Amino acid sequence: MKTQSWLAAGVFAAVAAASPLAASPAKAQGALVMYCGVQEEWCRAMSTAFEKETGIKVAMTRKSAGEIYAQLKAESANPRGDIWWGGTGDPHLQAAEEGLTQEYESPANKGLNDWAISQWKAAKQRSIGIYAGALGFGFNTQQIKSKGMAEPKCWADLLDPKLKDDVQVADPNSSGTAYNLLATMVQLMGEDKAFDYLKALHKNVNQYTKSGAAPAKATSLGETAVGIVFIHDAVVFAVQGDPIKPVAPCEGTGYEIGSMSIVKGARNLDNARKFYDWALTPAAQGLAGPAKSYQVPSNKNAPVPPQSPKMSEMKLIDYDFVKYGSSAERTRLLAKWDREVKALP
Ligand code: PLP
């Protein structure tokens, strides 16, 4: 395991149906169908600001990353989306490899951090990094106290039998967050030990949610003692005073490069490119913090929200995005997880 060079350099401190507008070529000039992979509030802030600035009407749907990938695949013969904005980088890379998205080189690329451009190169120019965030978990301080447990600090602590039915995490088939966890464990522990860990964790899991951030809210409300999420998703509730504490696990952890891709066959290609260029500007990326999204932005001049977890202070694995975003590896690992973990009683 080694720290990312870009960290060391201090870098860190759609409607499911086609838009009715897309049906008419005249009106389509002013439309954009956006599949959005982050939290609803940030998705709305982005689509509203873009509409205001350009007059282009945005039809936005929020879905989890694995779901958007599956939707693009299902719609590939008759694409309905124009831009896929947000969500973990792995399914963006799989979509790129499978030709579901298209190449683009934005003039805004030159203002981006190296890790965003690495994603673009890995995707053969079909996806770009828009933000980064580290994986971890949050725990409900009251619940942990009432169980008489020490505060969990490590992945290993989540296997404590006192947490039986009290850990929540998403399903990696739908959720980019949960796939990031699966790939992180394989890289951190080796595949056999990772699956042993996930099988043992299964005993404590009360629910595999569809969305990756849902366990953070459930933890903040005390519906579960622990939620495995991107750390910034737990911070959202901690900063508003909820009894949730975010943790960067002691063994080390993985991270995501949240990404953006233009759909192959996009009906509103010019508008998709306009959105893409705009979404890489400091002003657009600055909409994250006010929308309670505390990822680290990819534009070097975008404001980093003060609440953003300090990734440079964490032990991060050298996440192999090319391997774990490849179609063969993602498909294989998900099928194995379904067979060996989810199918357990
Ligand atoms: N919400 C936030 C704030 C994220 O950063 C991400 C990942 O990019 C997600 C949600 C991912 O959602 P899901 O795991 O549901 O695909």
Image: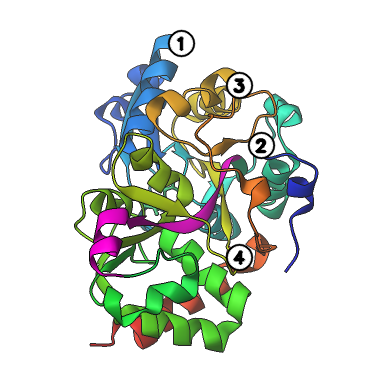
Q: Amino acid at mark 4?
A: Gly
Question: What residue is drawn where x is 48% and y is 71%?
Answer: 155
Is there any visible trace of residue 227 in the rendered image? yes
Kindly indicate whether the residue at mark 3 contacts the one at mark 1 (C-beta within 8 angstroms).
no
- In 3D space, how far apart are the residues under numbered discs 4 and 2 (Cα atoms)? 18 Å
- In 3D space, how far apart are the residues under numbered discs 1 and 3 (Cα atoms)? 15 Å
Secondary structure under tag 3 reads helix
In which quadrant is the C terminus drawn? bottom left
- Mark 1 against mark 2, which lies toward the viewer? 2
Tell me if the residue at label 4 has its CB under 8 Å from ligand 1: no
Q: Amino acid at mark 2?
A: Ala
Q: Is residue 340 magenta?
A: no
Q: Earlier in the sequence, mark 1 or mark 3?
A: 1
Q: Which residue lies under the disc numbered 3? A: 282
Q: Earlier in the sequence, mark 4 or mark 2?
A: 2
> x and y percent of residue 198 in the render?
42, 80
Q: Which residue lies under the disc numbered 2? A: 13
Kindly indicate whether the residue at mark 2 contacts the one at mark 3 (C-beta within 8 angstroms).
no
Figure check: 123 above or below 203:
above
Q: Which residue lies under the disc numbered 1? A: 53
How crowded pointer 1 is (Cα within 10 Å; few <14, some 14-19, many 20+) is rated as: few
- In 3D space, how far apart are the residues under numbered discs 4 and 3 (Cα atoms)? 30 Å
In front of the other: 337 or 304: 304
Picture disc at residue 252: 4
In which quadrant is the N terminus drawn? bottom right
In front of the other: 94 or 4: 4
